[in-house]
């Protein structure tokens, strides 16, 4: 049976493992990319903060340069005379001549009233009383109270009309006469524009590496862009639209409360940029809503993290390839034994001898392989058992029409009379009652029709009967008259039947009920159309070892069920082990069953059991427990595996003395083919002291099941028996 490769378990195992590895690698790269972008944005944000501070310092530096030239100009007496005399032509000529030395775009002199006296512009703005730095220069005491001690004052002002209209960054100084009187205020200033933005970018924006795209700066006044380093028209329009839109409104609201907005992600010049709007410092900067929009490209900040991402990618790919190779080899290693088991099952289904994978491991696949080996051993043992049982039934069929536990010749009448039963069989002494005849067709208790005799023993005779009320066959054990007339014995028998009825297990023959008919007590049991273990063992040197393990394990499982109900059988022997048509064990005849810890003898001192299988505590009449049955199971295992009982003697007293005193022989001495663990288990079961035997029948069942895994399947049926023959 061949499975297509794309449907095989190995392929599915490999595919799932590959998908898991791919998923983990992808997740790792995704997390790395997210964290890299996050760290890059944090680095860019920190860089923008540094650039904003540098630009603020740049404005201060420009102001200091302008103030240095202004200080020289205002301390020249000729210039002061022109101001005092309001000599407009001479003053304008002097301002124009010194404009380059003043490092400014415009220069002007303001009267004490705030009106324009002279300037280098076209004079469109005539009143400067609304310019903050002029007011501060006019009132130095008030300026000092505001934290600006002078003598120069830096700030911004707006010229709305004329050729020089725009936003200016300027410095103002007070002009005083010889007596300290106010002559006016002189102002020098530079207009904010694209040149200013370029200058700021050149001083504040540092490239991480040569060739990196530069950052960009836009100088904002409210909703207007007054200067920018953006050169592409689409980018300029995009910035202007943002400043005049909701984004700009939100930024202005934020700057009213703090100096910098949170970072914003924009796409400019075809690249991702991180931008922030920073408030400008200086007098009237807040009133004019002056700010700087600074953007930096993310690519340079992502570059180090991209190197890490690539390293992770390559490591991930290498790990993925290695993992896939490992997954493929692991899948093959895991599924190869399963494929072998599948082939073995297919061969078994075809009736061929299967070839099992060698040396199963200690994992789940190994457990499955060992379980399959045990199953095959069980099937082989079962086949051998069924074949042997069929031979027995065929032999019986040639002698009787109803095989099973039958007498050599079916009897139409059986005489029940007092018998000289051995004390060890529990038969109390008493008067000999008259014989009792049971005939075919007789009815007991008005419902059980006698059909045939199945067997007899010390307690009575077992017959097959038909339960006419339930319309099913049952087995009836009719108690012998000398026992049935003993009230103590009958009462004890009732208690034992109550115990036996509590047991429900597939390896235990069910006991149905206790009844009496015309003073004759009887016990009804499940009728089994089968063969006893004694019949199976007769005529064979010993049983094949797999059969020994199978029968012993099933007997142990049945005893475990009885012991869990608190019942001790007390008479385990081959005659009480029967096989159904499926070859499964049924423990029968719980007629001597007793509660745990009950004594081994009755009130009259009679000892119960079958001498060959009695434990030492039974022989002594001491309390019995579940380990008493395990001793009998040890005798049973020894006899099945070697063909001989561990103890045998010509007389019962001598046999009982051997149980008490003699050491049990080694099973391997009689059958060297037996495994050492089996011999050790039997030795433990035959220990003289109960405390030296296994604690539970379930423990014995587990040990026998474990031994079943070691059965060599290549041994042909009956090979062990052939060795002895």
Image (tube, helix red, strand yellow):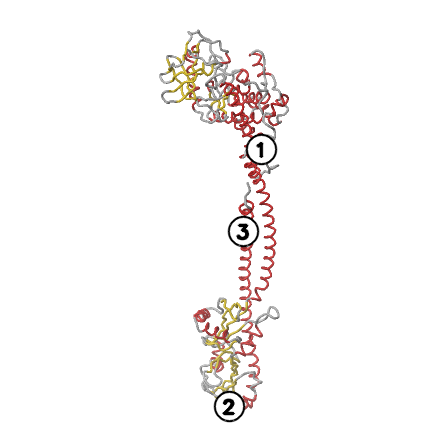
Q: CA distance from mark 1 to mark 3?
A: 39 Å
Residue 677: percent from left, percent from top: 61, 27
Q: Nearer the viewer, mark 1 or mark 3?
A: 1
Q: Is residue 96 above or below residue 238?
A: below
User: 141 or 172: nearer the eye?
Assistant: 172
Q: Position of residue 154 (x, y in %)?
A: 51, 78
Q: CA gap, disc 2 to disc 3? A: 90 Å
Q: Which residue is mark 1?
A: 353
Instruction: Answer left or right for 329 relative to 486.
Output: right
Q: Residues within 10 Å of mark 1 (few under 14, many from 20)?
A: some
> Can you name the residue that lies furthest to the front here?
398
Q: Tell me if I can see residue 596 in this picture.
A: no
Q: N-terminal of the two: label 1 or label 3?
A: 3
Tag 3: Cα neighbours inside 10 Å, few (<14), some, or many (≥20)?
few
Q: Dot 2, crowdedness within 10 Å: few (<14), some or many (≥20)? A: some
Tell me the mark number nearer the camera, choosing from 2 and 3: 3
Q: In the depicted view, which residue is nearer to us: 196 or 74? A: 196
Q: In the structure shown, which secondary structural element does the residue marked by tag 2 occupy?
A: helix
In front: label 1 or label 2: 1
Question: Which comes sooner in the sequence, label 1 or label 2?
Answer: 2
Label 3, on which residue? 19
Whether tag 1 and tag 3 are in contact, CB under 8 A, the answer is no
The residue that label 2 is drawn on is 84
383 with respect to 498 (left or right): right
């Amino acid at each position: 049976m061949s499975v297509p490769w794309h449907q095989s378990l190995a392929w599915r195992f490999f595919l799932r493992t590959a998908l898991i590895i791919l998923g983990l690698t992808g997740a790792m790269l995704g997390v790395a990319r997210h964290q890299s972008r996050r760290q890059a944005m944090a680095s860019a944000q920190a860089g923008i903060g540094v650039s904003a501070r540098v630009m603020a310092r740049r404005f201060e530096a420009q102001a200091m340069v302008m103030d240095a030239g202004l200080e020289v100009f205002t301390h020249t007496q000729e210039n002061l005379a022109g101001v005092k005399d309001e000599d407009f032509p001479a003053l304008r000529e002097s301002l124009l001549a010194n404009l380059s030395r003043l490092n400014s775009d415009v220069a002007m002199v303001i009267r004490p009233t705030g009106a324009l006296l002279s300037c280098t512009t076209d004079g469109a703005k005539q009143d400067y009383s609304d310019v903050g730095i002029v007011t501060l220069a006019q009132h130095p005491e008030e300026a000092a109270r505001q934290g600006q001690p002078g003598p120069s004052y830096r700030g911004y002002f707006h010229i709305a009309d004329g050729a020089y209209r725009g936003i200016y960054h300027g410095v103002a100084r007070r002009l005083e006469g010889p007596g300290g009187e106010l002559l006016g205020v002189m102002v020098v200033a530079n207009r904010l524009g694209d040149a200013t933005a370029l200058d700021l970018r050149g001083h504040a924006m540092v490239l991480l590496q040569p060739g990196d795209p530069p950052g960009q700066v836009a100088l904002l006044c409210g909703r207007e862009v007054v200067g920018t380093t953006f050169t592409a028209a689409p980018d300029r329009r995009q910035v202007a639209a943002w400043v005049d839109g909701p984004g700009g409104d939100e930024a202005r609201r934020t700057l009213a409360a703090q100096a910098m907005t949170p970072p914003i992600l924009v796409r400019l010049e075809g690249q991702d940029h991180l931008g922030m709007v920073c408030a400008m410092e200086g007098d009237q900067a807040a009133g004019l809503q002056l700010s700087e929009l600074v953007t930096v490209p993310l690519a340079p900040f992502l570059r180090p993290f991209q190197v890490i991402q690539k390293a992770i990618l390559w490591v991930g790919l290498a790990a993925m390839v290695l993992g896939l190779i490992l997954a493929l080899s692991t899948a093959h290693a895991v599924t190869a034994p399963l494929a072998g088991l599948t082939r073995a099952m297919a061969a078994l289904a075809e009736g061929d001898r299967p070839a099992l994978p060698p040396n199963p491991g200690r994992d789940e696949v190994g457990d499955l392989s060992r379980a399959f080996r045990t199953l095959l051993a069980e099937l082989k043992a079962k086949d051998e058992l069924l074949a042997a049982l069929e031979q027995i039934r065929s032999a019986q069929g040639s002698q009787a029409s109803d095989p099973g536990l039958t007498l050599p010749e079916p009897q139409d009448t059986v005489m029940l009379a007092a018998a000289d039963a051995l004390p060890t069989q529990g038969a109390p002494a008493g008067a000999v009652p008259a014989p009792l005849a049971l005939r075919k067709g007789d009815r007991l208790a008005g419902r059980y029709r006698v059909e045939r005799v199945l067997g007899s023993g010390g307690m009575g005779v077992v017959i097959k009967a038909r339960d006419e009320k339930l319309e099913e066959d049952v087995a009836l054990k009719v108690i012998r008259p000398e026992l049935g007339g003993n009230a103590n014995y009958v009462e004890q028998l009732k208690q034992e039947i109550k115990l036996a009825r509590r047991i429900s297990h597939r390896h235990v023959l069910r006991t149905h009920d206790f009844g009496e008919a015309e003073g004759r007590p009887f016990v009804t049991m499940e009728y089994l159309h089968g063969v006893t273990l004694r019949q199976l063992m007769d005529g064979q040197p010993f049983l094949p070892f797999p059969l020994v393990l199978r029968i012993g394990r099933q007997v142990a499982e049945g005893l475990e069920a009885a012991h869990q109900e608190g019942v001790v059988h007390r008479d385990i022997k081959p005659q009480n082990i029967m096989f159904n048509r499926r070859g499964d064990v049924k423990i029968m005849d719980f007629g001597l069953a007793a509660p745990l810890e009950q004594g081994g003898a009755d009130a009259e001192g009679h000892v119960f059991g079958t001498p060959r299988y009695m434990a030492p505590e039974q022989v002594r009449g001491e309390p019995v427990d579940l380990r008493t049955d395990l001793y009998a199971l040890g005798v049973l295992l020894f006899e099945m595996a070697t063909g001989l009982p561990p103890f045998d003697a010509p007389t019962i007293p001598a046999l009982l003395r051997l149980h008490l005193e003699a050491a049990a022989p080694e099973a391997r001495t009689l059958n060297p083919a037996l495994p050492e663990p089996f011999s050790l288990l039997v030795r433990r079961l035959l220990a003289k002291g109960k405390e030296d035997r296994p604690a539970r029948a379930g423990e014995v069942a587990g040990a026998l099941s474990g031994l079943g895994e070691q059965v060599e399947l290549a041994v042909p049926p009956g090979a062990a028996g052939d060795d002895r023959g």
